[in-house]
Amino acid sequence: MDKPQLKTEELELEGFHCADCAVTIEQTVAKMNGVEDVKASFTSGKVKVSYVPAEVTHADLVRSVEKIGYRVSREAHKNIERKALWKDREVRFTALSGLLLAVGLV
């Protein structure tokens, strides 16, 4: 049986300051269906999560962490969304088509 393809994300958290926080976050996120691995580092304030995208989404991860009292840095959240947008083949094709059309009109 094929293993599902995993996606790995790093969430930057606010209000995350100690080893107990790291344990709480790891235990909470690890309980989610589709999460394969969680590593929380209070020294960097980041959580690295590997998960199956068909079973859990970025928004699910954010909700899970925020439900226990931590906030995901909005700047980091925007960067993830921005990266994901350019990974979309249709978006790249549309942007390239628009650029070629604009150059052709000049």
Image (cartoon, rainbow, N blue to C red):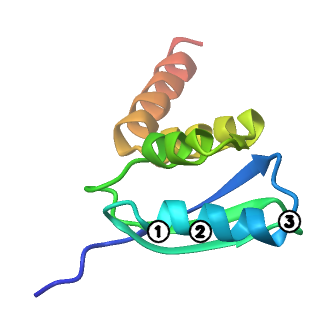
Regarding mark 3 in the picture, which secondary structure is present there? loop
The amino acid type, in three-letter code, at marker 1 is: Ala
Of 55 and 19, which appears nearest the observer?
Answer: 19
Q: Which residue lies furthest to the top in this view?
A: 105
Mark 2 burial class by Cα count in 10 Å: few <14, some 14-19, many 20+: many
Which label was assigned to residue 30?
1
Residue 7, percent from left and from top: 44, 65
Q: Name which quarter of the figure residue 55 lies in.
A: bottom left
User: Residue at the location (88% across, 58% down)?
Assistant: 17
Tell whether 88 sits left or right of 27.
left
CB contact under 8 Å: marks 1 and 2: yes
Residue 89, percent from left and from top: 37, 45
Of 2 and 20, which appears nearest the observer?
Answer: 20
Q: Mark 3 points at which residue?
A: 18
Q: Name the residue under label 2.
A: 26
Regarding mark 1 in the picture, which secondary structure is present there? helix
Asked if residue 100 shows in the view, the reply is: yes
User: Residue at the location (76% across, 68% down)?
Assistant: 20
In the displayed structure, 56 sits above or below 91; it is below
As measured in the structure, the alpha-carbon distance from the residue carrying label 2 to the one carrying label 3 is 13 Å
As measured in the structure, the alpha-carbon distance from the residue carrying label 1 to the one carrying label 2 is 6 Å
The amino acid type, in three-letter code, at marker 3 is: Cys
